[in-house]
Image (spheres, grey):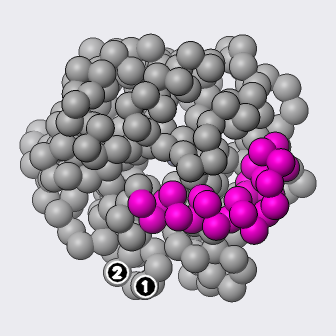
């Protein structure tokens, strides 16, 4: 299996990232993709990737950081994106969820920073890893503007949420769909009207990819603890159950999908 989205570059793993990475590789996890959310965590993702053969990096600016950017951030990001183990641009997107710790960042800034990253991904022929929360309509509108180019260079929505219509539009763009440990949680997430299990059912097997978003979104039965890439296996088991296929088949398909998407 492959964890296509986690944050081992975050403070939560400062002390034991090496053990965490080894623990995943000792299980059925073949590759891990570590994702930046601003310039410094992107840089850290690249540094970590240099030390492990099967660890890769994604570099980008999360919408939460769209209002805290230094000048020429885009030039710096492009430089990083050209590093050999960088496999995509992300996590980039728009987020209109009102978090307790974070007010909604100025929508215009979010959009501008997202659009710059869409264009960078096309310029460098790298897939785009999109973060969306309560902004699906707007993201699709932006991506549709680039549709003919994106169809040659597909990307993915990470940590899928939203409704069936949004999912269909994402698939229309040729995008892959990532699910995390929150598929094991019961009921609807705040502000959502569609169950994640229903989104899984509507996603074709050849478009599914697995992720953990570690240290967040820990799957049941470990919910409440720190998440880690080895738990991507639990995500795979859950997806297999929802789709009515064997775990082996799910592991094989999602691994193949991640290989195709990220060219690894
Ligand atoms: Zn995200
Ligand atoms: Zn993330």
248 or 229: nearer the viewer: 248
- Tell me if I can see residue 181 in this picture: yes
Magenta span contains residue 147: no
| 211 on left or right of 116 | right
Query: Is 114 drawn above or below residue 26 in the view shown?
Result: above
* Label number found at residue 53: 1
Query: Is 14 drawn above or below residue 76 in the view shown?
Result: below
Q: Main secondary structure of the magenta part?
A: helix
> Which is in the foreground here, disc 2 or disc 1?
1
| 29 on left or right of 194 | left
Label 1, ligand 2: CB separation under 8 Å? no
Q: Which residue is mark 2?
A: 50
Q: Residue 162 sits in which quadrant?
A: top right
Q: x, y (%) of residue 144?
A: 30, 21
| 198 on left or right of 84 | right
The quarter of the rendered structure image containing the N terminus is: bottom right
- Tell me if I can see residue 70 in this picture: no
Count residues near mark 1 (Cα–Cα under 10 Å), then give few for <14, some for 14-19, many for 20+: few
Label 2, ligand 2: CB separation under 8 Å? no
Count residues near mark 2 (Cα–Cα under 10 Å), then give few for <14, some for 14-19, many for 20+: some
Tally the marks.
2
Residue at 18% across, 43% down? 122
| 136 on left or right of 243 | left
Magenta segment boundaries in residue numbering: 233-260
Q: CA distance from mark 2 to mark 1?
A: 7 Å
The quarter of the rendered structure image containing the C terminus is: bottom left
Query: Is 181 drawn above or below residue 151 in the view shown?
Result: below
Query: Is 50 drawn above or below residue 219 in the view shown?
Result: below
Q: x, y (%) of residue 112?
A: 22, 24
Residues tagged 2 and 1 counted as in contact (Cβ below 8 A): no
């Amino acid at each position: 299996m492959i964890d296509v989205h986690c944050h081992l570059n975050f403070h939560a793993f400062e002390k034991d990232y090496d053990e965490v990475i080894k623990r995943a590789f000792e299980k059925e996890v073949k590759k891990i993709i570590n994702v930046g959310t601003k310039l410094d965590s992107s840089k850290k993702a690249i540094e970590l990737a240099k030390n492990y053969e099967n660890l890769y990096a994604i570099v980008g600016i999360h919408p939460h950081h769209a209002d805290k950017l230094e000048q020429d951030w885009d030039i710096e990001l492009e430089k990083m994106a050209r590093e050999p183990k960088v496999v995509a641009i992300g996590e980039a997107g728009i987020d209109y969820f009102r978090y307790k710790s974070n007010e909604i960042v100025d929508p215009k800034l979010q959009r501008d920073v997202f659009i710059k990253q869409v264009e960078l991904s096309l310029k460098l022929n790298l897939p785009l890893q999109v973060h969306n929360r309560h902004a699906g309509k707007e993201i699709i509108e932006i991506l549709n503007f680039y549709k003919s180019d994106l169809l040659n260079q597909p990307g993915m929505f990470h940590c899928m949420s939203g409704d069936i219509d949004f999912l269909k539009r994402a698939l229309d763009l040729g995008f892959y769909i990532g699910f995390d440990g929150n598929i094991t949680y019961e009921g609807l997430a705040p502000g959502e009207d569609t169950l994640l299990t229903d989104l899984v059912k509507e996603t074709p097997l050849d478009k599914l990819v697995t992720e953990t978003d570690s240290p967040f979104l820990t799957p049941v039965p470990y919910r409440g603890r720190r998440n880690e890439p080895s738990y991507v296996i639990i995500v795979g088991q859950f997806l297999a159950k929802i789709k009515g296929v064997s775990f082996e088949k799910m592991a094989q398909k999602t691994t193949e999908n991640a290989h195709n998407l990220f060219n690894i």
